[in-house]
Image: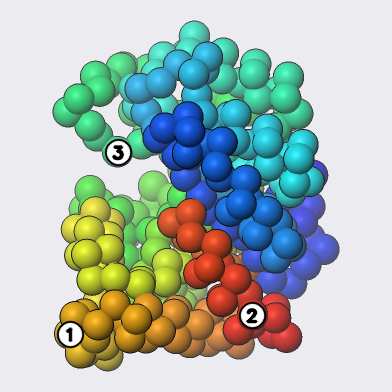
């Protein structure tokens, strides 16, 4: 089922993001995680994508097939384009179609000095436009409540996002953030700009200090003073920080749902315990 159809029938969609394990042995052991996640009845599970691999050895597609066939949950495959040409995207499209995978999160992909860039797709909107000619895909796009690190301004951010939607993005999944006010302002700006597709906030429960430092460096998310105090207070106590991080994420999600967001996209970091605790905390809310 296309995730646009899911949005039509549900007020708030619940989804998880996982990443393919790097080792084949870990891929075989991911069934425990998928078993727990599927029991939580997500509307879909998205699978991240590592640039540089070919369609023949791509664990993202292998994992998406497993989620669809063995766990009967709709997969959303991340697909980056900066390091691929049209022939390679054609092959990815062919395999996705043959496996019955119709939901794709189209991304430019992060710049990586170890993986050479190619010239045919410079932006996610280029990939979206091209994918629309390759099959009946439902295409999602990424969005950034606090702006993409390379954006010149908020106006530039919204204009570029509008290009994605005009190119064919039907759903938007947001980068993580820790202050809901950024999300509310961002959604309002999108609606004023004529972006009417569902916008699902992305939430990552932070359960260790190293994780928060890495995430802030990678995506540029700002830390509210209240959250910084939590980290500083409990960063040397693993169990306390876990509980505090989970409580903070739950408070974010409850506030978002109370304000009628289109859904919650939970960055699980392949940790089913985190997903289960979040779902238990909102089981009567979503």
Rate crowding at label 3 as few (under 14), some (14 to 19) or many (20 or more) other CA atoms within 10 Å: few
Rate crowding at label 1 as few (under 14), some (14 to 19) or many (20 or more) other CA atoms within 10 Å: few
Give the mark, 1 or 2, whose residue is nearer the N terminus: 1
Q: Cβ–Cβ below 8 Å for labels 1 and 2?
A: no
Rendering quarter of residue 70: top right
Residue positioned 41% across, 14% down in the render: 85
The residue where tag 1 is placed is: 232
Q: Residue 156: x and y, percent? A: 30, 53
> Does residue 186 appear anywhere in the picture?
no
* Relative height, residue 79 to residue 163 (above, below): above
The residue where tag 2 is placed is: 280
Residue positioned 34% across, 55% down in the render: 157
Q: Residue 43: x and y, percent? A: 71, 58
Rate crowding at label 2 as few (under 14), some (14 to 19) or many (20 or more) other CA atoms within 10 Å: few
* Relative height, residue 219 to residue 47 (above, below): below
Give 9 or 234, whichever is nearer the viewer: 234
Quadrant including the N terminus: top right
The residue where tag 3 is placed is: 110
Give 71 or 197, whichever is nearer the viewer: 71
Q: Marks 3 and 2: which is nearer the front?
A: 2
* Relative height, residue 7 to residue 189 (above, below): above
Please tell me how many numbered marks the rendered image carries.
3
Q: Is residue 150 left or right of residue 195?
A: left
Q: Residue 35: x and y, percent? A: 68, 54
Give 61 or 178, whichever is nearer the viewer: 61
Q: Secondary structure at mark 2?
A: helix
Q: Is residue 209 left or right of residue 92?
A: left
Rendering quarter of residue 176: bottom left
Give the mark, 3 or 1, whose residue is nearer the N terminus: 3
Q: Secondary structure at mark 1?
A: helix
Q: Secondary structure at mark 3?
A: loop
């Amino acid at each position: 089922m296309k995730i646009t159809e899911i949005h039509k029938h549900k007020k708030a969609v619940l989804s998880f993001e996982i990443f393919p394990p790097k080792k084949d042995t870990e891929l075989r052991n991911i069934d425990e995680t998928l078993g727990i996640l599927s029991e939580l009845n997500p509307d879909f599970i998205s699978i991240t994508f590592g640039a540089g691999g070919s369609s023949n050895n791509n664990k993202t597609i292998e994992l998406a097939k497993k989620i669809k066939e063995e766990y009967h949950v709709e997969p959303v495959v991340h697909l980056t384009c900066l390091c691929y040409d049209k022939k390679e995207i054609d092959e990815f499209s062919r395999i996705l179609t043959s496996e019955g995978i119709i939901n794709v999160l189209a991304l430019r992909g992060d710049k990586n000095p170890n993986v050479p860039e190619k010239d045919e797709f410079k932006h996610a909107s280029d990939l979206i436009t091209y994918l629309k000619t390759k099959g009946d895909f439902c295409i999602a796009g990424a969005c950034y409540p606090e702006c993409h690190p390379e954006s010149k301004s908020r106006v530039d951010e919204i204009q570029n996002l509008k290009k994605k939607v005009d190119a064919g993005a039907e759903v938007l999944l947001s980068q993580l953030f820790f202050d809901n006010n950024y999300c509310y302002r961002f959604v309002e700006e999108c609606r004023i700009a004529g972006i009417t597709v569902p916008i699902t906030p992305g939430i990552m429960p932070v359960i260790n200090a190293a994780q928060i430092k890495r995430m802030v460096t990678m995506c540029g998310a700002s830390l509210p003073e209240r959250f910084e105090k939590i980290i500083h207070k409990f960063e040397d106590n693993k169990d306390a920080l876990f509980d505090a991080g989970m409580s903070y994420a739950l408070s974010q999600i409850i506030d978002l749902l109370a304000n009628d967001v289109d859904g919650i996209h939970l960055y699980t970091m392949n940790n089913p315990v985190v997903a289960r605790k979040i779902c238990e905390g909102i089981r009567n809310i979503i």
